[in-house]
Image (cartoon, grey):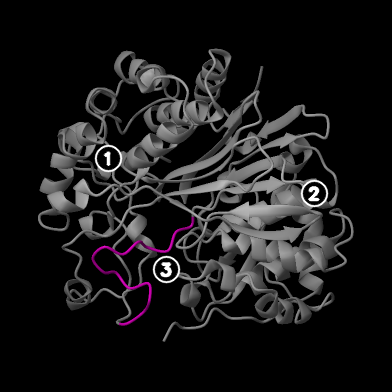
Protein backbone atom coordinates (compact mmCIF):
# COMPACT_ATOMS: atom_id res chain seq x y z
CA UNK A 1 0.00 0.00 0.00
CA UNK A 2 1.08 3.56 -0.72
CA UNK A 3 -0.44 6.83 0.51
CA UNK A 4 0.59 10.23 -0.84
CA UNK A 5 -0.72 13.72 -1.50
CA UNK A 6 -1.09 13.05 -5.26
CA UNK A 7 -2.83 10.13 -6.94
CA UNK A 8 -0.17 10.19 -9.68
CA UNK A 9 2.58 9.53 -7.15
CA UNK A 10 0.53 6.90 -5.34
CA UNK A 11 -0.11 5.11 -8.62
CA UNK A 12 3.59 5.01 -9.46
CA UNK A 13 4.44 3.70 -6.00
CA UNK A 14 1.85 0.93 -6.24
CA UNK A 15 3.10 -0.02 -9.72
CA UNK A 16 6.64 -0.35 -8.38
CA UNK A 17 5.34 -2.67 -5.65
CA UNK A 18 3.45 -4.67 -8.27
CA UNK A 19 6.67 -5.09 -10.25
CA UNK A 20 8.51 -6.53 -7.24
CA UNK A 21 9.91 -3.35 -5.75
CA UNK A 22 10.33 -2.79 -2.04
CA UNK A 23 8.57 -0.18 0.06
CA UNK A 24 11.76 1.87 -0.30
CA UNK A 25 11.54 1.70 -4.09
CA UNK A 26 7.90 2.77 -3.89
CA UNK A 27 8.71 5.64 -1.53
CA UNK A 28 11.58 6.96 -3.65
CA UNK A 29 9.62 6.59 -6.90
CA UNK A 30 6.55 8.29 -5.45
CA UNK A 31 8.62 11.10 -3.93
CA UNK A 32 10.35 11.70 -7.27
CA UNK A 33 6.95 12.06 -8.95
CA UNK A 34 5.87 14.52 -6.26
CA UNK A 35 9.09 16.45 -6.89
CA UNK A 36 7.84 16.91 -10.47
CA UNK A 37 4.13 17.52 -9.88
CA UNK A 38 4.21 19.35 -6.53
CA UNK A 39 7.06 21.89 -6.62
CA UNK A 40 4.99 24.14 -4.36
CA UNK A 41 5.59 21.64 -1.55
CA UNK A 42 8.66 19.53 -2.16
CA UNK A 43 11.45 18.60 -4.54
CA UNK A 44 15.12 17.70 -5.01
CA UNK A 45 16.02 21.18 -3.80
CA UNK A 46 14.77 20.29 -0.31
CA UNK A 47 15.53 17.82 2.48
CA UNK A 48 14.32 14.31 3.35
CA UNK A 49 13.82 12.43 6.60
CA UNK A 50 12.60 8.83 6.81
CA UNK A 51 11.92 5.92 9.13
CA UNK A 52 12.19 2.36 7.83
CA UNK A 53 10.84 -0.80 9.44
CA UNK A 54 12.40 -3.80 7.66
CA UNK A 55 9.54 -6.20 8.43
CA UNK A 56 11.26 -7.95 11.31
CA UNK A 57 10.63 -7.42 15.01
CA UNK A 58 13.61 -5.14 15.52
CA UNK A 59 13.68 -1.37 15.85
CA UNK A 60 13.29 0.82 12.77
CA UNK A 61 16.17 2.69 11.19
CA UNK A 62 16.17 6.46 10.77
CA UNK A 63 17.50 8.49 7.85
CA UNK A 64 18.53 12.11 8.30
CA UNK A 65 19.06 13.66 4.86
CA UNK A 66 18.92 17.26 5.99
CA UNK A 67 21.59 19.59 4.71
CA UNK A 68 23.93 21.99 6.44
CA UNK A 69 24.61 25.68 6.03
CA UNK A 70 27.32 26.43 3.51
CA UNK A 71 30.93 27.29 4.31
CA UNK A 72 30.16 30.94 3.60
CA UNK A 73 27.52 31.21 6.32
CA UNK A 74 28.16 34.37 8.32
CA UNK A 75 25.65 35.47 10.98
CA UNK A 76 27.46 38.76 11.50
CA UNK A 77 26.81 39.66 7.87
CA UNK A 78 23.07 39.20 8.39
CA UNK A 79 23.04 41.03 11.71
CA UNK A 80 24.90 43.92 10.09
CA UNK A 81 21.98 44.21 7.69
CA UNK A 82 19.69 44.73 10.66
CA UNK A 83 18.17 41.25 10.51
CA UNK A 84 17.00 39.54 13.68
CA UNK A 85 15.54 36.54 11.85
CA UNK A 86 16.75 34.53 8.89
CA UNK A 87 15.59 35.90 5.51
CA UNK A 88 12.61 33.97 4.20
CA UNK A 89 12.82 34.61 0.45
CA UNK A 90 15.31 35.74 -2.14
CA UNK A 91 18.46 35.08 -0.12
CA UNK A 92 20.83 32.10 -0.47
CA UNK A 93 21.67 32.37 3.23
CA UNK A 94 18.52 30.38 4.00
CA UNK A 95 19.37 27.68 1.42
CA UNK A 96 21.12 24.88 3.27
CA UNK A 97 22.69 22.21 1.03
CA UNK A 98 19.63 20.23 -0.19
CA UNK A 99 19.75 16.65 1.07
CA UNK A 100 16.82 15.07 -0.79
CA UNK A 101 18.78 13.36 -3.58
CA UNK A 102 21.35 12.07 -1.10
CA UNK A 103 18.46 10.72 0.95
CA UNK A 104 16.83 8.96 -1.99
CA UNK A 105 20.14 7.37 -2.95
CA UNK A 106 20.87 6.21 0.60
CA UNK A 107 17.39 4.75 1.00
CA UNK A 108 17.54 2.99 -2.36
CA UNK A 109 21.06 1.65 -1.79
CA UNK A 110 20.15 0.07 1.54
CA UNK A 111 16.61 -1.12 0.93
CA UNK A 112 15.86 -0.97 -2.79
CA UNK A 113 15.33 -3.99 -5.04
CA UNK A 114 14.72 -2.47 -8.47
CA UNK A 115 17.31 -0.54 -10.53
CA UNK A 116 17.30 3.19 -9.82
CA UNK A 117 16.57 3.91 -13.48
CA UNK A 118 13.35 1.93 -13.15
CA UNK A 119 12.40 3.63 -9.88
CA UNK A 120 12.80 7.12 -11.37
CA UNK A 121 11.47 6.33 -14.85
CA UNK A 122 7.93 7.65 -14.39
CA UNK A 123 9.13 10.86 -12.76
CA UNK A 124 11.40 11.46 -15.75
CA UNK A 125 8.58 10.70 -18.18
CA UNK A 126 6.16 13.09 -16.48
CA UNK A 127 8.75 15.85 -16.32
CA UNK A 128 9.53 15.49 -20.03
CA UNK A 129 6.09 14.70 -21.49
CA UNK A 130 4.05 16.76 -19.08
CA UNK A 131 1.40 16.32 -16.41
CA UNK A 132 -1.90 18.03 -15.65
CA UNK A 133 -1.56 20.81 -13.10
CA UNK A 134 -3.41 19.94 -9.91
CA UNK A 135 -5.80 22.38 -8.24
CA UNK A 136 -3.23 22.91 -5.48
CA UNK A 137 -0.40 23.72 -7.89
CA UNK A 138 -2.60 26.07 -9.91
CA UNK A 139 -3.67 27.83 -6.70
CA UNK A 140 -0.07 28.43 -5.63
CA UNK A 141 1.56 29.02 -9.04
CA UNK A 142 1.34 32.79 -8.74
CA UNK A 143 3.99 32.67 -6.01
CA UNK A 144 6.52 31.47 -8.58
CA UNK A 145 6.19 34.80 -10.41
CA UNK A 146 8.56 36.29 -7.84
CA UNK A 147 11.33 33.90 -8.87
CA UNK A 148 14.04 35.20 -11.18
CA UNK A 149 15.10 32.61 -13.72
CA UNK A 150 13.64 29.55 -15.39
CA UNK A 151 10.95 28.15 -13.10
CA UNK A 152 8.93 25.99 -15.52
CA UNK A 153 5.82 27.14 -13.61
CA UNK A 154 3.87 29.92 -15.36
CA UNK A 155 2.30 32.43 -13.00
CA UNK A 156 -1.11 32.18 -14.68
CA UNK A 157 -1.23 28.39 -14.53
CA UNK A 158 -4.76 27.00 -14.64
CA UNK A 159 -5.98 23.70 -13.26
CA UNK A 160 -5.52 20.89 -15.79
CA UNK A 161 -3.00 22.77 -17.93
CA UNK A 162 -0.11 20.61 -19.11
CA UNK A 163 3.16 21.41 -17.33
CA UNK A 164 6.59 20.22 -18.47
CA UNK A 165 9.71 20.43 -16.34
CA UNK A 166 12.70 19.61 -18.57
CA UNK A 167 15.28 20.79 -16.03
CA UNK A 168 14.03 18.34 -13.43
CA UNK A 169 14.06 15.57 -16.04
CA UNK A 170 17.69 16.37 -16.87
CA UNK A 171 18.59 16.32 -13.18
CA UNK A 172 16.99 12.92 -12.64
CA UNK A 173 18.65 11.48 -15.74
CA UNK A 174 21.98 12.76 -14.45
CA UNK A 175 21.41 10.97 -11.14
CA UNK A 176 20.55 7.73 -12.96
CA UNK A 177 23.65 7.93 -15.14
CA UNK A 178 26.22 9.48 -12.78
CA UNK A 179 24.92 9.01 -9.25
CA UNK A 180 25.06 11.88 -6.78
CA UNK A 181 27.83 13.64 -8.75
CA UNK A 182 25.42 14.02 -11.64
CA UNK A 183 23.26 16.17 -9.39
CA UNK A 184 25.52 17.92 -6.89
CA UNK A 185 28.37 18.48 -9.34
CA UNK A 186 26.20 18.81 -12.43
CA UNK A 187 23.76 21.41 -13.69
CA UNK A 188 21.99 21.72 -10.34
CA UNK A 189 25.15 22.06 -8.28
CA UNK A 190 26.67 24.58 -10.66
CA UNK A 191 23.51 26.65 -10.49
CA UNK A 192 23.49 26.58 -6.67
CA UNK A 193 27.15 27.65 -6.44
CA UNK A 194 26.63 30.53 -8.86
CA UNK A 195 23.51 31.71 -7.07
CA UNK A 196 25.08 31.66 -3.62
CA UNK A 197 28.12 33.68 -4.68
CA UNK A 198 30.24 32.21 -1.91
CA UNK A 199 27.50 30.93 0.40
CA UNK A 200 28.28 27.37 -0.73
CA UNK A 201 31.50 25.80 -1.97
CA UNK A 202 32.32 22.76 -4.08
CA UNK A 203 33.47 20.96 -0.95
CA UNK A 204 30.07 21.60 0.67
CA UNK A 205 28.35 19.86 -2.23
CA UNK A 206 30.92 17.04 -2.29
CA UNK A 207 29.93 15.87 1.20
CA UNK A 208 26.83 13.63 1.23
CA UNK A 209 24.14 14.97 3.53
CA UNK A 210 22.40 11.66 4.23
CA UNK A 211 23.27 9.73 7.37
CA UNK A 212 21.70 6.83 9.22
CA UNK A 213 20.94 7.81 12.81
CA UNK A 214 19.37 6.25 15.88
CA UNK A 215 15.60 6.83 16.12
CA UNK A 216 13.85 8.08 19.24
CA UNK A 217 11.18 6.03 21.02
CA UNK A 218 8.59 6.25 23.79
CA UNK A 219 5.84 3.93 24.95
CA UNK A 220 2.36 5.43 24.78
CA UNK A 221 -1.21 4.37 23.94
CA UNK A 222 -0.16 0.72 24.38
CA UNK A 223 2.42 0.87 21.59
CA UNK A 224 5.96 1.99 20.89
CA UNK A 225 6.14 5.31 19.03
CA UNK A 226 9.21 6.18 16.93
CA UNK A 227 10.51 9.28 15.26
CA UNK A 228 13.73 10.83 13.95
CA UNK A 229 16.13 12.65 16.30
CA UNK A 230 17.15 16.32 16.45
CA UNK A 231 17.62 18.54 14.63
CA UNK A 232 14.06 17.33 13.84
CA UNK A 233 11.21 18.45 16.09
CA UNK A 234 9.90 14.87 16.00
CA UNK A 235 10.56 14.47 19.72
CA UNK A 236 7.54 16.74 20.27
CA UNK A 237 5.19 14.11 18.81
CA UNK A 238 6.51 11.53 21.23
CA UNK A 239 6.61 13.90 24.19
CA UNK A 240 3.05 15.07 23.58
CA UNK A 241 1.84 11.47 23.27
CA UNK A 242 3.60 10.40 26.48
CA UNK A 243 2.10 13.31 28.38
CA UNK A 244 -1.41 12.77 26.97
CA UNK A 245 -1.33 9.02 27.62
CA UNK A 246 -1.23 9.68 31.35
CA UNK A 247 -4.36 11.84 31.28
CA UNK A 248 -8.04 10.91 31.26
CA UNK A 249 -8.71 12.11 27.72
CA UNK A 250 -12.25 10.85 27.34
CA UNK A 251 -13.94 10.87 23.93
CA UNK A 252 -13.01 13.08 20.99
CA UNK A 253 -16.53 14.51 20.83
CA UNK A 254 -15.92 16.14 24.20
CA UNK A 255 -14.11 19.46 24.46
CA UNK A 256 -12.07 17.96 27.31
CA UNK A 257 -10.30 15.71 24.76
CA UNK A 258 -9.24 18.68 22.66
CA UNK A 259 -8.28 20.71 25.72
CA UNK A 260 -6.01 18.02 27.17
CA UNK A 261 -4.31 17.39 23.84
CA UNK A 262 -3.75 21.13 23.36
CA UNK A 263 -2.22 21.28 26.82
CA UNK A 264 -0.07 18.20 26.18
CA UNK A 265 1.29 19.68 22.95
CA UNK A 266 1.93 23.04 24.64
CA UNK A 267 3.74 21.50 27.58
CA UNK A 268 5.86 19.42 25.24
CA UNK A 269 6.85 22.26 22.93
CA UNK A 270 6.85 25.64 24.65
CA UNK A 271 10.66 25.67 25.02
CA UNK A 272 11.43 24.24 21.57
CA UNK A 273 13.21 27.42 20.46
CA UNK A 274 15.70 27.01 23.30
CA UNK A 275 16.30 23.25 23.33
CA UNK A 276 16.06 22.14 19.66
CA UNK A 277 19.29 22.42 17.68
CA UNK A 278 21.77 20.33 15.71
CA UNK A 279 23.28 17.89 18.21
CA UNK A 280 20.58 18.21 20.88
CA UNK A 281 20.11 15.08 23.03
CA UNK A 282 16.77 13.70 21.92
CA UNK A 283 16.65 11.02 24.62
CA UNK A 284 17.13 13.62 27.31
CA UNK A 285 14.29 15.66 25.87
CA UNK A 286 12.03 12.60 26.30
CA UNK A 287 13.17 11.67 29.80
CA UNK A 288 10.13 10.98 32.03
CA UNK A 289 11.84 13.00 34.75
CA UNK A 290 11.59 16.00 32.40
CA UNK A 291 8.11 15.30 31.03
CA UNK A 292 6.46 14.16 34.27
CA UNK A 293 6.27 17.63 35.84
CA UNK A 294 4.85 18.96 32.58
CA UNK A 295 2.06 16.41 32.70
CA UNK A 296 1.46 17.21 36.37
CA UNK A 297 1.12 20.91 35.52
CA UNK A 298 -1.91 20.33 33.29
CA UNK A 299 -5.26 21.39 34.71
CA UNK A 300 -8.21 19.51 33.23
CA UNK A 301 -10.40 22.59 33.69
CA UNK A 302 -8.15 25.52 32.78
CA UNK A 303 -5.82 26.47 29.95
CA UNK A 304 -2.21 26.69 30.95
CA UNK A 305 -0.15 29.81 30.56
CA UNK A 306 3.19 28.43 29.39
CA UNK A 307 5.13 30.94 27.33
CA UNK A 308 7.83 30.23 24.80
CA UNK A 309 10.92 31.53 26.59
CA UNK A 310 13.39 33.87 25.00
CA UNK A 311 16.48 31.85 24.14
CA UNK A 312 19.97 32.83 26.27
CA UNK A 313 5.04 24.90 5.84
CA UNK A 314 4.87 23.52 2.99
CA UNK A 315 5.83 19.89 2.93
CA UNK A 316 4.74 16.55 1.56
CA UNK A 317 4.58 13.29 3.49
CA UNK A 318 4.15 9.79 2.09
CA UNK A 319 4.23 6.24 3.37
CA UNK A 320 4.55 2.83 1.78
CA UNK A 321 4.49 -0.79 2.96
CA UNK A 322 5.29 -3.85 0.86
CA UNK A 323 4.19 -7.48 0.93
CA UNK A 324 7.16 -8.50 3.08
CA UNK A 325 6.16 -6.05 5.79
CA UNK A 326 8.76 -3.38 5.12
CA UNK A 327 7.34 0.06 5.85
CA UNK A 328 8.72 3.49 4.99
CA UNK A 329 7.59 6.77 6.57
CA UNK A 330 9.12 9.60 4.51
CA UNK A 331 8.85 13.36 4.39
CA UNK A 332 10.31 15.82 1.86
CA UNK A 333 9.93 19.59 1.87
CA UNK A 334 10.84 22.95 0.41
CA UNK A 335 10.08 24.41 3.88
CA UNK A 336 7.80 27.32 2.84
CA UNK A 337 5.88 26.70 -0.40
CA UNK A 338 8.25 27.17 -3.33
CA UNK A 339 11.00 27.60 -0.76
CA UNK A 340 13.37 30.53 -0.97
CA UNK A 341 11.84 31.65 -4.29
CA UNK A 342 15.19 30.88 -5.90
CA UNK A 343 16.08 28.28 -8.53
CA UNK A 344 19.37 26.53 -9.14
CA UNK A 345 20.41 28.06 -12.46
CA UNK A 346 19.09 26.52 -15.65
CA UNK A 347 17.77 23.43 -13.83
CA UNK A 348 14.62 25.31 -12.81
CA UNK A 349 14.65 23.36 -9.52
CA UNK A 350 13.32 25.36 -6.60
CA UNK A 351 15.61 25.71 -3.60
CA UNK A 352 14.21 25.30 -0.12
CA UNK A 353 14.57 27.87 2.64
CA UNK A 354 15.13 25.41 5.46
CA UNK A 355 17.64 27.81 6.95
CA UNK A 356 14.64 29.70 8.33
CA UNK A 357 15.01 27.41 11.33
CA UNK A 358 18.32 28.99 12.33
CA UNK A 359 18.58 31.61 15.06
CA UNK A 360 20.44 34.90 14.66
CA UNK A 361 21.04 35.41 18.36
CA UNK A 362 24.79 35.32 18.96
CA UNK A 363 25.81 32.22 20.88
CA UNK A 364 22.46 30.43 20.51
CA UNK A 365 23.04 26.68 19.97
CA UNK A 366 20.86 26.93 16.85
CA UNK A 367 22.68 29.98 15.49
CA UNK A 368 23.29 30.17 11.74
CA UNK A 369 26.83 28.85 11.32
CA UNK A 370 28.85 27.04 8.60
CA UNK A 371 28.28 23.29 8.56
CA UNK A 372 25.43 23.42 11.06
CA UNK A 373 22.00 21.90 10.38
CA UNK A 374 19.02 24.09 11.26
CA UNK A 375 16.23 23.03 13.63
CA UNK A 376 13.78 21.14 11.44
CA UNK A 377 9.98 20.93 11.44
CA UNK A 378 9.95 17.68 9.42
CA UNK A 379 8.92 14.85 11.74
CA UNK A 380 7.77 11.49 10.30
CA UNK A 381 6.39 8.89 12.71
CA UNK A 382 6.24 5.10 12.91
CA UNK A 383 4.47 2.87 15.43
CA UNK A 384 5.29 -0.70 16.44
CA UNK A 385 3.38 -3.14 18.60
CA UNK A 386 4.86 -4.45 21.84
CA UNK A 387 6.46 -7.37 19.96
CA UNK A 388 8.26 -5.00 17.58
CA UNK A 389 6.04 -5.64 14.56
CA UNK A 390 5.00 -2.74 12.36
CA UNK A 391 1.67 -1.20 13.34
CA UNK A 392 1.47 2.22 11.73
CA UNK A 393 3.17 4.75 9.45
CA UNK A 394 2.05 8.36 9.84
CA UNK A 395 3.04 11.90 8.96
CA UNK A 396 1.80 15.24 7.73
CA UNK A 397 2.77 18.60 6.33
CA UNK A 398 2.18 21.62 8.49
CA UNK A 399 5.35 23.29 9.72
CA UNK A 400 5.28 23.71 13.51
CA UNK A 401 1.88 21.98 13.56
CA UNK A 402 3.16 18.56 12.48
CA UNK A 403 3.56 17.10 16.01
CA UNK A 404 0.18 18.53 17.02
CA UNK A 405 -1.60 16.90 14.07
CA UNK A 406 0.21 13.60 14.64
CA UNK A 407 -0.72 13.67 18.31
CA UNK A 408 -4.39 13.88 17.32
CA UNK A 409 -4.03 11.03 14.82
CA UNK A 410 -2.29 8.81 17.37
CA UNK A 411 -4.87 9.61 20.03
CA UNK A 412 -7.68 8.74 17.63
CA UNK A 413 -6.25 5.55 16.12
CA UNK A 414 -4.35 4.05 19.05
CA UNK A 415 -6.30 5.64 21.88
CA UNK A 416 -9.85 5.53 20.55
CA UNK A 417 -9.54 2.72 17.99
CA UNK A 418 -10.65 4.84 15.05
CA UNK A 419 -9.83 3.66 11.53
CA UNK A 420 -7.24 5.52 9.44
CA UNK A 421 -10.04 6.99 7.34
CA UNK A 422 -11.96 8.23 10.38
CA UNK A 423 -8.87 9.67 12.04
CA UNK A 424 -7.45 11.43 8.98
CA UNK A 425 -10.78 12.98 7.97
CA UNK A 426 -11.72 14.07 11.51
CA UNK A 427 -11.64 17.79 12.38
CA UNK A 428 -8.45 19.18 13.89
CA UNK A 429 -7.00 22.00 15.91
CA UNK A 430 -3.57 23.57 15.55
CA UNK A 431 -1.72 26.20 17.53
CA UNK A 432 -0.57 29.57 16.26
CA UNK A 433 1.14 32.51 17.92
CA UNK A 434 -0.99 35.58 18.50
CA UNK A 435 -1.01 37.79 15.42
CA UNK A 436 0.53 35.09 13.22
CA UNK A 437 -0.78 32.48 10.78
CA UNK A 438 -0.06 28.85 11.51
CA UNK A 439 3.32 27.93 10.09
CA UNK A 440 6.81 28.50 11.45
CA UNK A 441 6.19 31.00 14.26
CA UNK A 442 4.11 29.04 16.78
CA UNK A 443 6.73 29.06 19.50
CA UNK A 444 8.02 32.59 18.97
CA UNK A 445 9.02 33.97 22.37
CA UNK A 446 6.67 36.37 24.09
CA UNK A 447 3.55 35.40 22.11
CA UNK A 448 0.49 33.72 23.54
CA UNK A 449 -0.89 30.76 21.64
CA UNK A 450 -4.24 30.73 19.82
CA UNK A 451 -6.10 27.49 19.14
CA UNK A 452 -7.18 27.46 15.50
CA UNK A 453 -10.18 25.21 14.92
CA UNK A 454 -11.15 23.63 11.63
CA UNK A 455 -14.75 24.57 10.87
CA UNK A 456 -16.17 21.08 11.61
CA UNK A 457 -14.36 21.28 14.97
CA UNK A 458 -16.26 24.35 16.10
CA UNK A 459 -18.16 22.13 18.53
CA UNK A 460 -15.02 22.36 20.67
CA UNK A 461 -15.08 26.14 20.59
CA UNK A 462 -17.27 26.82 23.61
CA UNK A 463 -15.62 24.14 25.74
CA UNK A 464 -12.14 25.45 24.99
CA UNK A 465 -13.11 29.09 25.45
CA UNK A 466 -14.69 28.24 28.80
CA UNK A 467 -11.36 26.80 29.90
CA UNK A 468 -9.54 30.00 28.98
CA UNK A 469 -8.21 29.20 25.53
CA UNK A 470 -8.11 31.88 22.85
CA UNK A 471 -9.84 30.18 19.94
CA UNK A 472 -10.52 30.99 16.31
CA UNK A 473 -12.56 29.01 13.80
CA UNK A 474 -10.95 28.85 10.34
CA UNK A 475 -13.43 27.91 7.64
CA UNK A 476 -11.61 29.02 4.49
CA UNK A 477 -8.14 27.50 4.81
CA UNK A 478 -8.17 23.68 5.01
CA UNK A 479 -4.42 23.46 4.31
CA UNK A 480 -3.78 25.16 7.67
CA UNK A 481 -4.63 21.82 9.23
CA UNK A 482 -2.14 19.73 7.30
CA UNK A 483 -2.16 16.98 4.70
CA UNK A 484 -1.81 13.83 6.78
CA UNK A 485 -1.39 10.28 5.46
CA UNK A 486 -1.50 7.04 7.38
CA UNK A 487 -1.14 3.30 6.79
CA UNK A 488 -2.02 0.82 9.51
CA UNK A 489 -1.21 -2.89 9.73
CA UNK A 490 -3.98 -4.90 11.37
CA UNK A 491 -3.49 -7.82 13.74
CA UNK A 492 -4.30 -10.04 10.76
CA UNK A 493 -1.54 -8.56 8.63
CA UNK A 494 -3.88 -6.66 6.30
CA UNK A 495 -3.39 -2.97 5.50
CA UNK A 496 -5.71 0.00 5.93
CA UNK A 497 -4.70 3.42 4.72
CA UNK A 498 -5.97 6.93 4.19
CA UNK A 499 -4.85 10.03 2.31
CA UNK A 500 -5.95 13.40 3.60
CA UNK A 501 -9.09 14.75 1.85
CA UNK A 502 -7.77 18.27 2.49
CA UNK A 503 -5.17 17.57 -0.19
CA UNK A 504 -7.98 17.16 -2.77
CA UNK A 505 -5.97 14.87 -5.09
CA UNK A 506 -4.35 12.52 -2.56
CA UNK A 507 -4.83 8.77 -2.66
CA UNK A 508 -4.11 5.66 -0.61
CA UNK A 509 -4.04 2.51 -2.73
CA UNK A 510 -2.67 -1.00 -2.56
CA UNK A 511 -2.48 -4.41 -4.12
Q: Between label 3 and label 2, give the one nearer the viewer.
A: 3
Q: Is residue 443 left or right of residue 247?
A: left
User: Tag 1 or tag 3, which sits nearer the N-term?
Assistant: 1
Circle 3 SS class:
loop
Residue under the image location 42 percent in, 68 percent down: 279
Residue position for label 3: 279
Neighbor class of circle 1 (other Cα within 10 Å; few <14, some 14-19, many 20+) is some
Residue position for label 1: 145
Residue position for label 2: 414
Q: Is residue 111 above or below residue 448?
A: above
Residue in the foreground of this view, choosing between 80 and 95: 95
Q: Quadrant of residue 389?
A: top right
Circle 1 SS class:
helix
Q: Position of residue 109 (x, y in %)?
A: 40, 33
Circle 2 SS class:
helix
Q: Is residue 218 left or right of residue 179?
A: right
Real-space Cα separation, disc 1 to disc 2, in angstroms: 44 Å
Amino acid sequence: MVSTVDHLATGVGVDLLRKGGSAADAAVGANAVLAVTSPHMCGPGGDVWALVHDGSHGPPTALDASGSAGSGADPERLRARGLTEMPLHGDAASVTVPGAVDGWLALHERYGRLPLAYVLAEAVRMAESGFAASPLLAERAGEAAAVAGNTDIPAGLSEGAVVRRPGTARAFRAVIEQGRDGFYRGEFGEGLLALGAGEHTESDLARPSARWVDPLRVEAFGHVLWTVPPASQGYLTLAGAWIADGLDLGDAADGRWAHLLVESASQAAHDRVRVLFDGADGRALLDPARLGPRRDAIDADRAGNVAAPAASGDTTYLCAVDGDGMGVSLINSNAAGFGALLVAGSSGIFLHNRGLGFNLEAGHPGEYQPGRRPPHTLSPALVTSADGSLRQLAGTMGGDSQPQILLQLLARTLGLGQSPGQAVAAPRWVLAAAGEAAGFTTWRPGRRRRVLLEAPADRWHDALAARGHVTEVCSDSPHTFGHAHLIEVSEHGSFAGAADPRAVIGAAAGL
